[in-house]
Amino acid sequence: MNVLLDITVSTFVAGLIILTIVGLNGVISDVAFQTTTSVAVQQDISDLARIIEFDFYKIGYSADPAFDDLAFLYADSARLGFRSDIDRDSTAERIWYSLEDPEIEGLEGEAPPYKQLYRTVDDDEDDDIPELIGTGIVEFNLQYFNGVGVQLTGFPPTDPGTLASIRSIRIQVKLQSVILPDTVLGASYWEKYISPKNL
Amino acid sequence: MGNATIILVLGLGLNVGLLSYTLLSRSGDAVENYTIYYETTMAKNIANTAVDLTLQKLRDNATWRDGFQQVPFGENSQSGTLSSTLTDTAVGGKDYINVVAIGSYSGQSDTVVVLVSPEFVPDVVRGAFTAFGPLDDTISDMQIDGRDHDINGDLLPSPTDGVFGISSATDFVNTQDAVIGGTDAGGVDHEMDFPEDPEIIEENFDWGGTFPSGPDEVLGLPEGTLKAIAQSGANGSQYFTNYWDPPWIEWANNKFVSPPLRGVTFIEVPPGTEWRKIRISPDSEGIFVFHSSDTDAYWNDINLFPDVGEFKGLMIFDKVFHIHMDILGGLVILTPNTVVGKVCNGNQDHKIFFSSEAIENAVEEVGGGGYEIVSYWE
């Protein structure tokens, strides 16, 4: 009788321990997944921030002192075109940033849950292929300010004078991890106010 | 049964351990992401600081090319260093200085490359005729033009990148019908005219209490520099304290005329001194200073003798009236107590024309002026 009781109790205890460990295993797996996802998003936004900073601080730059072309080609809240001699060869390239909808299978005709940011360097060669520099973008906004810090409105502008008066840009970006086509997880936000010195 | 349970528990425990390790590792990665971003931003900021410090040194000493080498920076000087190098270069026949600055912070580094152009027209020269005090009567009925002219006095093609016709820290009224032109704040040139276009008159300019009290300040030089250069005789520079000793010449008709002036001409007189009808030689040039320690030296009636040609360069007076001569370059009056309530007629044939070239020729020799940033790579 005692032996039977021992076996029953020990089986029950073993079951409890196994259930606890399985549960703990599930929780930790979940947290590990979320953390990994979050780290990936942070890495993505950190990389995106570095690319944007690299380009935006050089708006209007040229290694040629005689360069005096208008720095901005186009500007609105989701698209920006500007001139910059980013490779320092004394010839200014035209650089475009544009926010686009992704192509997701099975979601044709539906609003995608995120957008993608493309960067194109137009150096008058034929192979100007847009480069995907950010995905999972759920918030993206560009604002423009003049020399005394007043926000400019009416973008895209219809006159070159407004483009010529831009002195600073505020960038706001929020990324979320793209795990499944119609699901977003994790989030990271970056905002910066950049005043390119060549304007 | 017992063994199987132990293996199962140990297996699950191992799994939990591995996941926990992964979790810890990912947390570390998250912190590292932000740390690297912070460190690269700090490196960029330090590099920009290196540029600021380098340009500041360059303003103090135009010939300085040493740069900075691994200078510790920040509260914890072990964390960051700044360095810079300066190289003279020429592009399209024009001289530039290329500044390469490097900021380092905790293993990250950033480079900033800046091309600067020597700018020898001092910031104080805001107009062809610049003063702290009122100029209503001092300009008489002269021709004054702030548009830029070449060294021969010919007007440069518009836009000329000139200056105002008149700049003063007070109101301005053109009391004697002077003909005035210049370049307005937006860079637009305006022909000489009477009445003048108000856009080329700078009234009530706020100097923030920083209007120069001495000639060195006009050029952004340490006090005593111009006097020392004049006393050294460099490039024909001369230092005077009076006009009755040689080499000033007394003519038969009682005119005192200076010798031809070159380089820096520094005339230092006691406070309260007034010179009347003292002439300077034609074809003089450079930087001309008439000054007392109280900034009240008064030159009453100045002209060239014989009255041909013009002075080319920058003239700086404590106080002057009856300007019966031509100036190609610029004129600055230091005193706030300029002459008012007097009339100076018959000056319609005399002119003050702004010429950046004439000023640059004069200022370059003494290492004055500043630097314009042409391009900034960061």
Image (spheres, coloured by chain):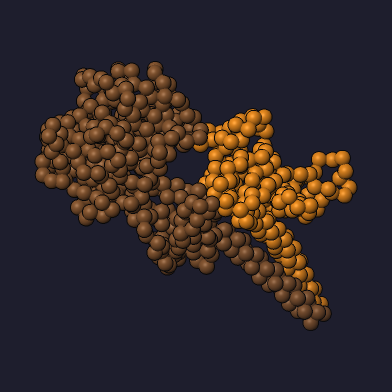
Q: Where in the figure is residue B136, as x and y percent of width and height?
A: 28, 22
Q: How many marks?
A: 0
Q: Is residue B269 left or right of residue B62?
A: left
Q: Colour of chain B?
A: brown
- Residue A192 visible in the current orientation: no
Residue A82's place in the image compared with A179, above or below, is above
Q: Where in the figure is residue B76, as x and y percent of width and height?
A: 40, 64
- Residue B264 visible in the current orientation: yes
Residue A81's place in the image compared with A14, above or below, is above
Residue lying at 30% horizontally and 38% vertically, measured from the top left? B311
Q: Is residue B289 left or right of residue B173?
A: left
Residue lying at 88% horizontally and 43% vertically, measured from the top left? A108
| Chain rendered orange | A
Q: Where in the figure is residue A152, as x and y percent of width and height?
A: 58, 32
Residue lying at 42% horizontally and 50% vertically, measured from the top left? B118
Comparing B376 with B14, the one in front is B376
Q: Where in the figure is residue B58, as x and y percent of width and height?
A: 38, 55
Comparing B143 with B167, the one in front is B143
Comparing A49 with B279, the one in front is B279
Quadrant in the picture for residue B358: top left
Look at the image and tell me in which quarter the N terminus of chain A lies. bottom right
Residue B41's place in the image compared with A151, above or below, is below
Look at the image and tell me in which quarter the C terminus of chain A lies. top right
Quadrant in the picture for residue B219: top left
